Image (cartoon, rainbow, N blue to C red):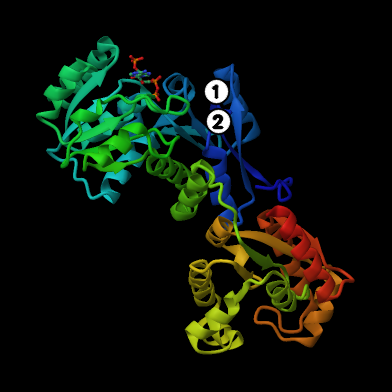
C-alpha cells in the first residue's frame, strides 16, 4: 500500500502487541481500505506500555485497534465497555473507538465460527479436541461451547488445560475433560471426537516439521483445523490430508477475524475474497518458474493497443485484449455496454475476461484502462504476467481524449483530469515495471518494453 493517499483527513487503525513485526494484519486491513478507496490507514505498533498506548488511542482519536499477544487479557482493564462474548472469554482482540468510548470485542471467536459455517460443520453436539490452552484456545473453546459443541482440551502443560476446562465447566455447566497432550490421551480423545483444532504453535514457521498429532492417528472421517497460517499447509494438515481427513488451514480464520474487525470499524462489508487472495499471495511459497507473459496497463493515450501489438510480434507472444474479450462476451461494443448495462456490469465482465485470458500462456495482454481498479485482477495477473505500466503525461491523455470518445469520459477535459488523478497511483502501485512513454513513438515504447522484459527473464 502506498502512502501517497495519506493526508490530514486520514483515519488511523492499528494493531498493538509485542512482537508485531510479522503481523499480517496491516496487509489485510490496508487491502480492505484500499478496496473501498477509504482514506484510512492501518499501522502496527510494538507496545511496551499498554496503559500509555490506550491513552494514546483516546488522545489521538485512533478509530480502531487490534490487540494481540501478550495484551488480549490485560487490555480489558482500560476499556469502557465489552461485548458479551469478549467478556465471557475474558479476552479482546478488537477495540472500537466510539467518540472516546472504547468498546472491546473478540472477533477470533466469531471468526472461527464463520470458518465452521463456511466448511459446513455444525458444532452442536459435535465432539471437538482443542489442542493448546492459550489465548486462541480460550476464544475458540468458548465460541464452540456456546454453540453446543462437546469439548476436550489437550495441552503440553496439563495444568493450563485444567484451568481452561474449569472455566468452561463453570460457564457452561458441562464436563470438559482436560488432558496432557500425548499419544495415549489423543487416542482416547479421538474415540469421542471427529474434529481436531490445533491452537498450539507446533508446525508454525520455522518449526515446519513439527506436528502436535502423530500422523498414524489421523484417519478418514476426521476434520482437522489448524489456526497456524504460516506455512499455509502445516505438516499436521499435510498428513491429515494424506490420511483422507478433511483439512482447513489457518488463513481462513485470520481473514475472517480481520474481516469482522473491519466491519466493526467501518460498517462496510469486508472484501473477504480480496483479503484472502492478498494473504495467500503473500504466504504462498514463491514459485521459481519464470513468468512468460506481460500485461500492459495504463491510461488512454499511452498507445497500449499499438504497443501491445508490436511487443507481441517482437517477442513472439500471442496478443490478447481484455476489452476484446468483454465485447465478445457481451456481443456489443464497450460504449454500448456502459450506456445500456452500466459500469458495474462491465467490470464484472472485465474480471471474467482477465481470468479467461490467464488460462493461456506466453501472452502479451492488453489490459483495459480500468483493470487495475480491482485488486483481484492485479493479483491474478501477477501470478502469470509481469505488469508494465505505460505511463503517459496528462497532456498526452487530454489530446487523445479530444479525438476519441471513451465510455467514462466523453470529451470532457475535467473528467479526464479527475480520472487521471484517481488512477495514476493505482497504475504505479500495480506495476512491476514503469515505462515512460511521453514523446515516444509506439515503436520506441515497444522496444523499451521488450528490452525490460528480456532483462527480467
Ligand atoms: P495463543 O494466544 O496464540 O494461543 P499462547 O497463549 O502463548 O498463544 O499459547 C500457546 C499454546 O501453544 C499453548 O497451549 C502452548 O502450550 P503450553 O501451555 O504447554 O505452553 C502450546 N505450545 C507451544 N509450543 C508447543 C510445543 N512445542 N508443543 C506443544 N504445544 C506447544
Disc sitting over residue 356 in the figure: none
Label 1 sits on residue: 19
Residue that appears at 52% across and 37% down:
24
What residue occupies the far front of the structure in this picture?
316
Q: Position of residue 258 (x, y in %)?
A: 46, 42
Lateral position of residue 394 relative to residue 280, left or right: right
Q: Quadrant of residue 437?
A: bottom right
Image position, residue 281 (x, y; %): 52, 48
Image point 84% across, 80% down: which residue? 399
Q: Label 2 CB, ligand 1: below 8 Å?
A: no
Q: Nearer the viewer, residue 192 or 203?
A: 203
Query: Which residue appears farthest toward the top when viewing the image?
Result: 159
Binning the other alpha carbons within 10 Å of mark 1 as few (below 14), some (14 to 19) or many (20 upward) gives some
Number of numbered discs overlaid on the protein picture: 2
Quick check: is the Cβ at mark 1 less than 8 Å away from ligand 1? no
Element type at marker 1? Answer: loop
Whether residue 231 is visible to the viewer of this picture, yes or no, is yes
Q: Position of residue 457 (x, y in %)?
A: 68, 54
In the depicted view, which residue is nearer to us: 376 or 257?
376
Tell me if label 2 and label 1 are in contact, CB under 8 Å.
yes
Please give left or right for residue 372 compared with residue 439 in the image.
left
Label 2 environment density (alpha carbons within 10 Å; few <14, some 14–19, many ≥20): few
Residue identifier under label 2 = 22
Please tell me whether residue 310 is drawn above or below residue 145 in the rendered image: below
> Residue placed at 25% from the left, 25% from the top?
214
Quadrant of the picture in which ligand 1 is shown:
top left
Q: Secondary structure at mark 2?
A: loop
Q: Residue at x 50, y 89 (%)?
A: 331
Amino acid at each position: 500500500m502506498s502512502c501517497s493517499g495519506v493526508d490530514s483527513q486520514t483515519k488511523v487503525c492499528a494493531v498493538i502487541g509485542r512482537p508485531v513485526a510479522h503481523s499480517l494484519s496491516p496487509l489485510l486491513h490496508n487491502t480492505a481500505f484500499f478496496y473501498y478507496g477509504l482514506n484510512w490507514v492501518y499501522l502496527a505498533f510494538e507496545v511496551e506500555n499498554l496503559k500509555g498506548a490506550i491513552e494514546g488511542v483516546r488522545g489521538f482519536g485512533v478509530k480502531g485497534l487490534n490487540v494481540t499477544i501478550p495484551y488480549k487479557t490485560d487490555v480489558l482493564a482500560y476499556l469502557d465497555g465489552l461485548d458479551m462474548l469478549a467478556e465471557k472469554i475474558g479476552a479482546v482482540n478488537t477495540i472500537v473507538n466510539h467518540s472516546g468510548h472504547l468498546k472491546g470485542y473478540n472477533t477470533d471467536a466469531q471468526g472461527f465460527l464463520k470458518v465452521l459455517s463456511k466448511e459446513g460443520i455444525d458444532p452442536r453436539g459435535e465432539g471437538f479436541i482443542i489442542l493448546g490452552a492459550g489465548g486462541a484456545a480460550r476464544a475458540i473453546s468458548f465460541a464452540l461451547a456456546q454453540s453446543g459443541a462437546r469439548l476436550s482440551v489437550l495441552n503440553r502443560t496439563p495444568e493450563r488445560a485444567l484451568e481452561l476446562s474449569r472455566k468452561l465447566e463453570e460457564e457452561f455447566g458441562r464436563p470438559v475433560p482436560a488432558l496432557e497432550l500425548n499419544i495415549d490421551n489423543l487416542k482416547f480423545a479421538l474415540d469421542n471426537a471427529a474434529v481436531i483444532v490445533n491452537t498450539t504453535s507446533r508446525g508454525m514457521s520455522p518449526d515446519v516439521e513439527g506436528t502436535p498429532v502423530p500422523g498414524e492417528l489421523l484417519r478418514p472421517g476426521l476434520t482437522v483445523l489448524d489456526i497456524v497460517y504460516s506455512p499455509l499447509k502445516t505438516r499436521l494438515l499435510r498428513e491429515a490430508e494424506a490420511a483422507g481427513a478433511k483439512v482447513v488451514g489457518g488463513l481462513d480464520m485470520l481473514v475472517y477475524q480481520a474481516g469482522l474487525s473491519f466491519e466493526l470499524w467501518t460498517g462496510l462489508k469486508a472484501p473477504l475474497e480480496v483479503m484472502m487472495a492478498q494473504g495467500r499471495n503473500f504466504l504462498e511459497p514463491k514459485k521459481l518458474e519464470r513468468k512468460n507473459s506481460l500485461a500492459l496497463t495504463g491510461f488512454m493515450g499511452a498507445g497500449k493497443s499499438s504497443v501491445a501489438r508490436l511487443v507481441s510480434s517482437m517477442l513472439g507472444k500471442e496478443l490478447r485484449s481484455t476489452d476484446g474479450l468483454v465485447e465478445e462476451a457481451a456481443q456489443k461494443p464497450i460504449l454500448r455496454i456502459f450506456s445500456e448495462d452500466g459500469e458495474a456490469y462491465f467490470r464484472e465482465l472485465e474480471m471474467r475476461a482477465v481470468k479467461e485470458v490467464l488460462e493461456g500462456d506466453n501472452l502479451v495482454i492488453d489490459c483495459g484502462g480500468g483493470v487495475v481498479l480491482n485488486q483481484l485482477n492485479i493479483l491474478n495477473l501477477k501470478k502469470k504476467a509481469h505488469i508494465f505500466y505505460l505511463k503517459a503525461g496528462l497532456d498526452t491523455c487530454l489530446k487523445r481524449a479530444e479525438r476519441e470518445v471513451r465510455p467514462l469520459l466523453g470529451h470532457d477535459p475535467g473528467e479526464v483530469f479527475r480520472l487521471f488523478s484517481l488512477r495514476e497511483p493505482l497504475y504505479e502501485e500495480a506495476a512491476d515495471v514503469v515505462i515512460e512513454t511521453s514523446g515516444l513513438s509506439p515503436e520506441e515504447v515497444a522496444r523499451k518494453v521488450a528490452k525490460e522484459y528480456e532483462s527480467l527473464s
